[in-house]
Image (cartoon, coloured by chain):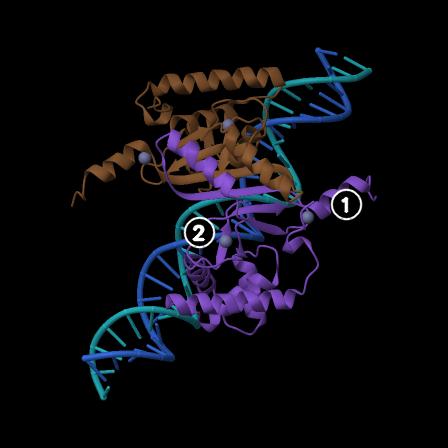
Chain colours: A brown, B purple, C blue, D cyan
Amino acid sequence: MPARALPYRPHNHDLCVDQALAQARESCRRNEARLTPVRERVLELIWQSHKPLGAYDVLAQLSADGHKAAPPTVYRALDFLQQHGLVHRIASLNAFTGCDHPGQHHCGTFLICRSCGNVLELAAPNITAAINQAATAETFQVEQITLEIAGLCPRCESDSTDQPTPS
Amino acid sequence: MPARALPYRPHNHDLCVDQALAQARESCRRNEARLTPVRERVLELIWQSHKPLGAYDVLAQLSADGHKAAPPTVYRALDFLQQHGLVHRIASLNAFTGCDHPGQHHCGTFLICRSCGNVLELAAPNITAAINQAATAETFQVEQITLEIAGLCPRCESDSTDQPTPS
DNA sequence: ATAAAATTTGCAACATTATAACAGTTGCCA
DNA sequence: TGGCAACTGTTATAATGTTGCAAATTTTAT
Ligand SMILES: [Zn+2]
Ligand SMILES: [Zn+2]
Ligand SMILES: [Zn+2]
Ligand SMILES: [Zn+2]
């Protein structure tokens, strides 16, 4: 039985966010990318909710800050964060989630719980290999992979199995 | 070198559409599902364009038919077709494409050319196996897989490689 | 230091994609 | 014939994402 991955376990989430931000600042410094206040705040908001956040959710939070913001502000910040591999967009949810391992822009594999909304990003070399093999067989040159797996996370799975239906 | 798959080869597309429609009618008859005129027409429109069609593209075509249609008409037809496995929604494109092998609702793997827009649906057991294995390792119960691979199809790949840049 | 250039942000309007709510219609069966 | 269920039409609205331009900020060059 493997240890459960982060979002499925209780953990010090503030620390979790701090670490992610520190890592992001470091990554941007190395790449000479400018992690401006708006961008950093957007990244922080996304990390604070361990669940994917829609652009308009981010916008609402910014407004709650007292920040006068409009959609383009958010989308531009999100574009930047995506370009620098700091967040991923989940196409099937129209939402964004933080990336554990920033650095170069990359495509992740996501386990999305339809019950609690938590998302876990996997690095799955086997899957990537299988995809590349299949694409190669069709002489297709892969540039970007969108792989989003919806279902039930361990916690929600056991909840729904154990309890028949709490009326 | 495998033979190139259907959308990448020249073929009699009218026949292609006819066959798809016949197959759809047959599938609906077996499942006692009602392939009404609107639904069939929407399916036909989607097949006629071998590229994914947005809901509002479909709407425009229906209007061109003289059919008084509004968004809900199209979205309802698309829902029906999806439920019965006759079309797939491509999340990364917000668009719909016909399914080769109707029957039960299923999730496909798609090769999407960013240049010509063609889409090829794969049945890739190896990929599915790798995904299930990775999910199982996280005790995650898979319900739906969204796998969309963007890149260059064989034709567009060779075009862009051969010609430096036609000014 | 100062001016020019590049980047980032604010802002208004707009475009695209999707859904809600309710009324009318059609086909089927008691 | 009347009632029921499924389907469709219609209007309005919600949710998501983009364009274009001007102001502000930061960087670079003089
Ligand atoms: Zn990542
Ligand atoms: Zn869950
Ligand atoms: Zn299919
Ligand atoms: Zn192509």
Residue tagged 2: B106
Badge 1 crowding class, 10 Å Cα cut-off, few under 14, some 14 to 19, many 20 or more, is few
Contact (Cβ within 8 Å) of mark 2 with mark 1:
no
Q: Which three-letter amino acid code belongs to the residue tagged 2?
A: His
Residue beneath the point at 53% across and 22% down: A102
Q: Nearer the viewer, residue B7 or C5?
A: B7
Q: Quadrant of the N terminus of chain B?
A: top right
Q: Nearer the viewer, residue A100 or A134?
A: A134
Helix, strand, or loop for circle 2? loop
Residue B161: where, in percent of width, then height?
A: 77, 40
Above or below, A69 relative to B3: above
Q: Nearer the viewer, residue A128 or A45?
A: A128
Badge 2 crowding class, 10 Å Cα cut-off, few under 14, some 14 to 19, many 20 or more, is some
Above or below, B78 relative to A4: below
Q: Quadrant of the C terminus of chain B?
A: top right
**Label 2 within 8 A of ligand 3 by Cβ:** yes
The tag on residue B159 is 1
Q: If you read the primary sequence from the N terminus, does the residue marked by circle 2 or circle 1 appear first?
A: 2
2 and 1 marks on the same chain: yes
